[in-house]
Image (tube, grey):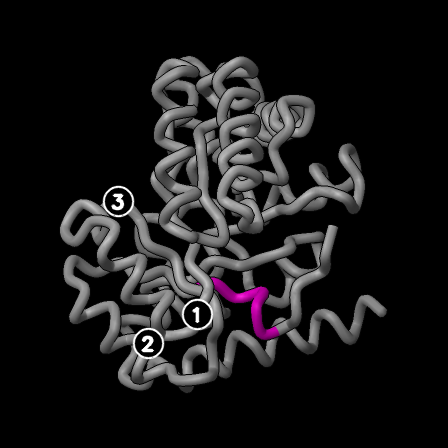
Amino acid sequence: MRVPDPKERLIVALDVDSKEAALSICQKIGNQAAFYKVGLQLFLAEGPEVVQALKNQGVKVFLDLKLHDIPNQVAGACRKIVKMGVDMTTVHTMGGFDMMQAAAEAIKQSSQELGVLPPILLGVTILTSLNQKRAGEIGITGLISEQVVNLAALAKESGLDGVVASPHEAGSIRQKIGDDFIIVTPGIRSSDDATQDQKRVMSACDAIKEGASYLVVGRPIIGADNPANAVAKITSEISRALQSTR
């Protein structure tokens, strides 16, 4: 696994509903960040055009649509995603082995046909908005932490590059699967940030120490009075964590 540059380890989540708002955030942050996430809200508002607009800014794009459908549908969607030129994308691990394998094969084949680098393909495990009680309501009877590790192992077996998981499970995933696996962790906050609707959260510094490869941060940055300063604060925590683990 290629270890990303410390600056690239932070992914800014563009949780807005227009291309103009997204590009405005990028402009305010400037060269402090190199990776941005486009989720359902922004993609449904603007479509592939917003991906191209961001790529034109020279940044990396994480298209987070959490695809979850029958294998054929997901494979077809993955082929379209490769054509967009994104750097990272997601399917949902709850779709099972066959769906994830079809996605991985479609990504690989389409990238070879187009002569481009394949986007990093991640499997979303258990949403960080779920705590143990809410997980039980949808039939997850065991511990969330155990379920996440099991899903991560299945994603690896299916040919995925990594998973999206709470930072609280990052250490267990890393221990079970090893270093050659990407772990992207949302739910990242600094000590003075509100958790909002995220339940399983952690500081940037602690998440890196637990084994996270990339950290996704949204509202603490895009809702800040000075987004560039908010980014600098988090990247400083990342650098400090990296230095302490050497």
Residue denoted by label 3: 40
Q: Give 137 or 124, whichever is nearer the viewer.
A: 124
**Left or right: 1, with 194 as reference point:** right
Is 9 part of what is drawn in magenta?
Answer: yes
Tag shown at residue 26: 2
Amino acid tagged 3 = Leu
Q: Residue at x 32, y 76 (%)?
A: 26
| SS class, disc 1 | loop
Q: From the viewer's perspective, is residue 18 above or below residue 237?
A: above
Q: Residue at x 46, y 20 (%)?
A: 94
Q: From the viewer's perspective, is residue 31 above or below residue 137?
A: below
Q: Give 169 or 1, whichever is nearer the viewer.
A: 1
| SS class, disc 3 | helix
**Magenta region:** 7-11
Distance in Å between CA atoms under marks 2 and 3: 18 Å
Is 134 part of what is drawn in magenta?
Answer: no
Q: Residue at x 47, y 32 (%)?
A: 126
Amino acid tagged 2 = Cys
Residue denoted by label 1: 59
Distance in Å between CA atoms under marks 3 and 1: 19 Å
Q: Position of residue 38 (x, y in %)?
A: 33, 54
CB under 8 Å between callouts 2 and 3?
no
Q: Main secondary structure of the magenta part?
A: helix
Q: Position of residue 121 (x, y in %)?
A: 54, 40
> Callout 2: few (<14), some (14-19), or many (20+) C-alpha neighbours within 10 Å?
many
